[in-house]
Image (cartoon, rainbow, N blue to C red):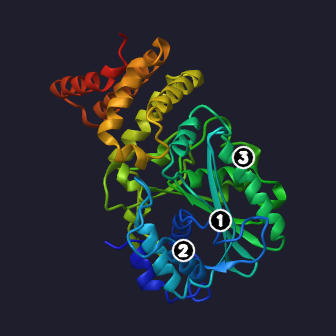
Amino acid sequence: MANILDYLDWRGDLSLTAAPFNEVDNLILAELSFIDYSGIVPEMTGRGAVTIAEAAERYFAREGTEQIDMGVLVPDAIVQLLQKAAKSSRFSDMRLVSYVSVTDLARQMQFAALTVELAPKLLYVAFRGTDDTLVGWKEDFNMSFLSPVPGQTEAVRYLERVARHFPAARLMVGGHSKGGNFAVYAAIHAKESVQKRILAVYNNDGPGFEGKVLGTPEHQRISDRIRTIVPEDDVVGMMMGHEERYSVVRSDQMGFLQHDGFSWQVLGDSFVHLSEIGFGGRLVDQTLKSFAAKLTREERERFVDALYVILTAGDAKTLTDLQKGSWKMAGTLLKTGYELDEESRRMVSYTLRLLFREGVKSLRHELKIEEKWERLLEERRQKLIHPFKDK
């Protein structure tokens, strides 16, 4: 089946005038925001713009044309996407402005955004999702007990600054993964005068929200323009409170790998849509809702903090660091798990037990699972939580 790379081969010669902006174009721009445009695209305080073609030329002059590693979970295909977009009539002349990228360990924030001028007085504001940094993943987990996280607050400021810099422009806002969450949050909390200029908000498999965000008057003003897109066996987009109205698209991957936007199937100028979410998505939705309901906000916070201590014990800063030193790092992480204070170990053990138990309950509900499989799952759970048991 075809994906967004094939879409550029098929329709890359069609201008936005010939074929209007669509949901596939949205995902392409959301994915392109993962590129490091530092020193290439002007920052918010700067002036001028560069086309996608110019940005690609400068990027590959800096990085080289060999295989570019984007990190453990960020698709390397994004680099190929930039190459194809830069050569296409549809995307090559789009202008990039207002690139911002900030990683703040103290505030536990990973934030990046990019504005794309699609046409005169028409902008797409793209928020980057989670990158390879551990602090970026920590911010994701912080969303389970903290609202807003610093990146969400920064997203609102960024959107309003762009709106001020381009006072006559209509806006579209979007992002993939955490970037989709930031896009929705920024659109909800932007000033009403900015909201009125927003044509669409694209949440491409972004996690939901902790706290009272959905259903507020601010949300109701923009809700009819929020377009949430999730793969068939969705995992990420089902986390926390989310839009109940969403489009389901077919993926050629399984489980968590469906979060990869390059796995989403494309036909013509749209994704291949399904009538409902699949078995895996229902299982995750049921599990996470039940799991979240049984943990207090304080318990979530203690678990996330303890997990972050373990992952950063060997001075790792990125997922790539963990992967490269996998054997040595595994010993360090295990040792750190044993050395956590009693309360932290208890919290990790309890949370993993709870998550596993709720997963089994959801699986039983979906499959009417037999008793022998329950015993096997219980054995796997015991092995998982062993490092965190009380000494």
Q: Give the Cα separation between the discs numbered 2 and 3.
A: 29 Å
Q: Secondary structure at mark 2?
A: helix
Instruction: Check disc 2 and report the residue beneath it.
Output: 59
Instruction: Check disc 3 and report the residue beneath it.
Output: 153
Q: Give the Cα separation between the discs numbered 3 and 1.
A: 16 Å
Amino acid type at circle 1 is: Leu
Examine the rendering and report whether any part of residue 201 can be seen.
Answer: no
Residue plotted at (50% across, 86% down): 87
Depth check, mark 1 against mark 2: the one in front is: 2
Amino acid type at circle 2 is: Tyr
Residue plotted at (40% across, 51% down): 277
Q: Is residue 111 left or right of residue 291?
A: right
Amino acid type at circle 3 is: Thr
Q: Residues within 10 Å of mark 2 (few under 14, many from 20)?
A: many
Q: Quadrant of residue 224?
A: bottom right
Q: Is residue 10 left or right of residue 46?
A: left
The C terminus, quarter of image: top left
Q: Which mark is residue 114?
A: 1
